Image (tube, rainbow, N blue to C red):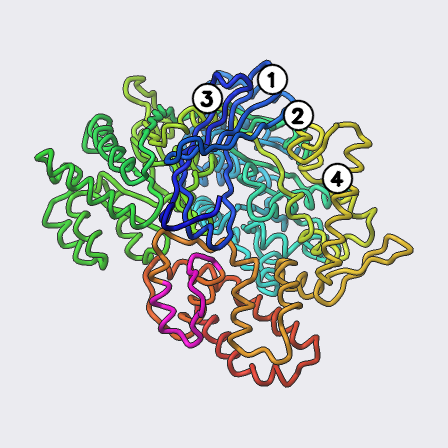
């Protein structure tokens, strides 16, 4: 229909329904509002939802879009399952055996016992006891899938201790890869605490090749993100530190997230498998893969080379520290009204389950603004209950003195009522202060944004997930948290006494040992969470969506020289193991060997054609040899996206001015994930009035616009709030290498005069970036 503001106003409400083939059963419903802005910008709405399939597969489902305002205004779309190939049935999880819990003195290694006791561990839990022999007494590849919070870090330490015990006076390296910087930092702190009595060096890779080569050469335990290990090992055939057979243990954590970050984790694990396969038996690298409980663990274990006796995948309900998960659905479609209803239930839940002063609660919310609102609402509800200080567990005068150190006036106020909150971008000293108050028991409640669920070192008797959605600024709508994020939030629910007794080899009373997790979500999502929060998590590869970047990197590193090399390289991937198990997910219509080979050849051909269009590679017509062009060299050297290098190559002109170059830089693919928050456009609009080169368009809800403004705000030393400061740091992490690449593209075109004109501006930018 044609949008007429006189008739339709600024928005139109619709319902999306999914029904079975007979129209008798409603399988899914969602209310959404179409905004006039989307129509004016000619933008599409993208909906992603999950529906259940019946045991007797229906031939067709119907998707209906119905106006909530206009009569007989609806559309029905049939969704055929005629050619659907269902994935193979998943294997049963590993049964948890009833072993007697093993004390740490069974290690028979004094330094190892001391390392574990430094972490407060005096006995192993049930899962650790069952996998103990594989991790401590064998050097074979291992896969361990277990619920988040099951003590997998202790298993990592067991594997490290085996290396230290077996090669006590030898220079043998251990590599740990964690998906995010925060995970790596947490692991660094844990390992430093465990091994400080031993003469072992622990280092974190920085992404700077020169520095990282020194770390790899001189340190015993190397901790890295997937990106930094990818940079380090791309040219592994020529790396003496890697080829010298010193790496004996490679640990890949959070494998259930391997499709995050452009599938880099999948690529580096595959590379380590390939590298290890080319070494003799005595020098093979032991590979250990860790994840939450996953449904397709057999393929994941086979991918990393684990044998049957070293494959463990425990069901989510066998947590060492029991958690009762209560899922409550709220039917309000308007999010603010839904949150108000949730907060009243949350307060009642806290009253019910926090039964003494030592028990505490963690509440997860979507952003900083909601953290503040929730803290104030809790304060108001407690006051209305005639117990305004019910969450404060410290002397009022003492906490008042501490509150004077807090710069955020809302936080300073609620802390005096026993409530704190933390968020990404918060000043480090302020966040540390709040976390220390919570750990000391002074605050009974702490509220955290969902992004910090991978960083916190806290736990509680009760955790609350207050709504299951976050705002996506690019799509201008609220989207659901991922299942791994929610599982991570749930993992913070642990009964303190239970943990203490378990670690100290004491028996637990079965009464009241279970921690609680309250999940508050939109009503239509309740059944979905009842399924996926209590069952192993299915994992699929996204390598096919990111293949061009990785092929360009491998060609740059000279690991791939021909199309045949491409095919051989991709057979080491997790995707290759999953193709025949879930063919329709990857676009296959059959599962024969010929069909799989044809699919891989076509996929590689499409990716190589794309690289050719981007002017990154050149393929010889008469043979299958692949040659890297200048833009491909720059992309590989600076580790940037091939779409970004294409953007630079096509848009940088000899007459380009500084404003144009900053615009090109801001459009880089690396900045697409910069978050856009609700109602943030007004802040960016005001900031736009103060920068040197103002943005001359009206749309401030795009990452490229935000990047353009925040880069200049940083160069001009303009003050921004904590949220924008956090985003600024994310932007600047990539800015240095992108500017280097941009300058190289200019130089490669022979525009030396252009470089000279920009020299002072670019030099200033580098100096500001180096201040970070």
Q: Name, please, the residue furthest toward the right.
A: 622
| Spatial CA span between label 2 and label 3 | 21 Å
Q: Which residue is denoted by mark 2 in the rendering? A: 84
Q: Could you tell me if the residues under marks 4 and 2 are in contact, i.e. CB atoms within 8 Å?
A: no
First in residue order: circle 2 vs circle 1: 1
What secondary structure is marked by label 4?
Answer: loop
Q: Which residue is denoted by mark 3 in the rendering? A: 26
Q: Which residue is denoted by mark 1 in the rendering? A: 57
Image: 653 above or below 369:
below
Report if residue 692 lies within the magenta region: yes
Q: Which of marks 2 and 3 is in front?
A: 3
Q: Name, please, the residue furthest toward the left.
A: 386
Q: Which residue is denoted by mark 4 in the rendering? A: 571
Write the start and end of the magenta stretch as one range.
Answer: 684-703
The residue nearer to you, when weighing 347 against 105, is 347
Give the residue at x 36% y 32%. Answer: 521
**Prevailing secondary structure class for the magenta stretch in the rendered image:** loop
Q: Which of marks 4 and 3 is in front?
A: 3
First in residue order: circle 2 vs circle 3: 3
Give the residue at x 63% y 56%. Answer: 231
Percent coordinates x, y for residue 355 in the rendering: 20, 27
Badge 2: residue crowd in 10 Å (few <14, some 14–19, many ≥20): some
| Spatial CA span between label 4 and label 3 | 42 Å
Image: 175 above or below 71:
below
What secondary structure is marked by label 3?
Answer: strand
Report if residue 316 lies within the magenta region: no
Percent coordinates x, y for residue 611 in the rendering: 72, 56
């Amino acid at each position: 229909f044609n949008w007429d503001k006189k008739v339709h106003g600024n928005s139109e409400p619709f319902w999306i329904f999914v029904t079975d083939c007979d129209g008798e059963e409603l399988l899914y419903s969602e209310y959404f509002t179409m905004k006039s802005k989307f129509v004016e910008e000619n933008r599409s709405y993208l909906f992603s939802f999950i529906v259940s399939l019946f045991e007797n597969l229906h031939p067709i489902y119907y998707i209906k879009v119905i106006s909530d305002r206009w009569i007989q205004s609806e559309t029905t779309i049939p969704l055929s399952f005629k050619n659907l190939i269902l994935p193979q049935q998943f294997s049963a999880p590993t049964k948890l055996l009833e072993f007697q819990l093993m004390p740490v003195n069974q290690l028979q290694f004094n330094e190892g016992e001391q390392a574990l006791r430094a972490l407060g561990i005096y006995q192993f839990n049930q899962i650790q006891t069952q996998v103990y022999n594989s991790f401590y007494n064998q050097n074979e590849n291992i896969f361990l899938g277990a619920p988040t919070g099951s003590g997998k870090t202790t298993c990592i330490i067991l594997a490290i201790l085996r290396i230290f015990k077996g090669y006590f006076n030898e220079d043998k390296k251990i590599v740990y890869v964690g998906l995010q910087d925060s995970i790596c930092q947490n692991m660094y702190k844990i390992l430093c605490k465990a091994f400080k009595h031993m003469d072992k060096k622990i280092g974190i890779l920085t992404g700077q090749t020169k520095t990282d080569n020194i770390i790899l050469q001189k340190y015993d335990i190397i901790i890295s993100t997937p990106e930094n290990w990818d940079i380090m090992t791309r040219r592994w055939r020529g790396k003496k530190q890697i080829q010298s057979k010193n790496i004996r243990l490679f640990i890949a954590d959070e494998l259930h997230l391997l499709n995050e970050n452009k599938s880099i984790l999948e690529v580096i694990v595959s590379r380590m498998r390939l590298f290890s396969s080319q070494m003799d038996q005595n020098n093979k690298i032991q590979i250990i893969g860790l994840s939450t409980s996953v449904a397709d663990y057999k393929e994941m274990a086979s991918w990393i080379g684990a044998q049957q006796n070293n494959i463990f995948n425990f069901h989510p309900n066998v947590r060492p520290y029991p958690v009762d998960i209560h899922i409550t659905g709220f039917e309000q479609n308007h999010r603010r009204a839904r949150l108000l209803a949730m907060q009243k239930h949350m307060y009642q839940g806290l009253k019910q389950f926090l039964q003494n002063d030592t028990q505490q609660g963690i509440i997860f919310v979507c952003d900083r603004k909601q953290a503040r609102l929730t803290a104030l609402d809790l304060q108001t509800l407690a006051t209305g209950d005639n117990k305004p200080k019910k969450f404060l567990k410290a002397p009022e005068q003492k906490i008042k003195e501490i509150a004077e150190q807090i710069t955020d006036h809302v936080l300073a106020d609620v802390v005096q009522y026993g409530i704190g909150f933390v968020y990404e971008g918060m000043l480090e000293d302020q966040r540390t202060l709040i976390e220390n108050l919570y750990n000391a028991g002074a605050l009974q409640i702490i509220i955290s944004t969902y992004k910090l669920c991978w960083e916190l070192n806290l736990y509680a008797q009760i955790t609350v997930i207050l709504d299951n959605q976050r705002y996506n600024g690019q799509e201008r709508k609220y989207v659901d948290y991922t299942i791994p994020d929610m599982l991570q939030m749930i993992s913070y629910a642990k009964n303190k006494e239970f943990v203490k007794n378990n670690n100290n080899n004491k028996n637990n009373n079965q009464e009241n040992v279970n921690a609680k997790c309250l999940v508050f979500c939109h009503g239509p999502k309740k059944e979905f969470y009842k399924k996926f929060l209590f069952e192993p998590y299915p994992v699929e590869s996204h390598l096919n969506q990111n293949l061009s970047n990785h092929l360009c990197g491998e060609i740059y590193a000279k690991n791939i020289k021909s199309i045949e090399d491409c095919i051989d390289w991709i057979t080491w991937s997790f995707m290759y193991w999953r193709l025949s198990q879930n063919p329709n997910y990857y676009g296959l219509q059959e599962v024969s060997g010929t069909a799989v080979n044809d699919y891989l050849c076509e996929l590689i051909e499409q990716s190589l054609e794309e690289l050719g269009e981007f002017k990154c590679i050149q393929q010889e017509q008469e043979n299958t040899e692949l040659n890297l062009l200048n833009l491909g060299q720059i992309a590989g050297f600076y580790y940037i996206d091939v779409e970004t290098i294409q953007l630079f190559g096509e848009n940088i002109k000899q007459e380009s001015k500084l404003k144009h170059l900053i615009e090109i830089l801001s459009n880089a693919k690396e900045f697409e994930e910069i978050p856009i928050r609700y109602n943030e456009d007004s802040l960016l609009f005001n900031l736009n009035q103060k920068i040197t080169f103002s943005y001359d368009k009206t749309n401030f809800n795009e990452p490229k616009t935000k990047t353009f403004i925040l880069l200049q705000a940083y160069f001009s030393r303009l003050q921004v709030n904590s949220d924008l400061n956090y985003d600024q740091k994310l932007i600047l992490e990539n800015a240095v290498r992108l500017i280097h690449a941009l300058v190289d593209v200019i130089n490669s075109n022979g525009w030396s005069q252009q470089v000279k004109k920009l020299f002072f501006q670019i030099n200033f930018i580098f100096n500001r970036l180096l201040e970070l």
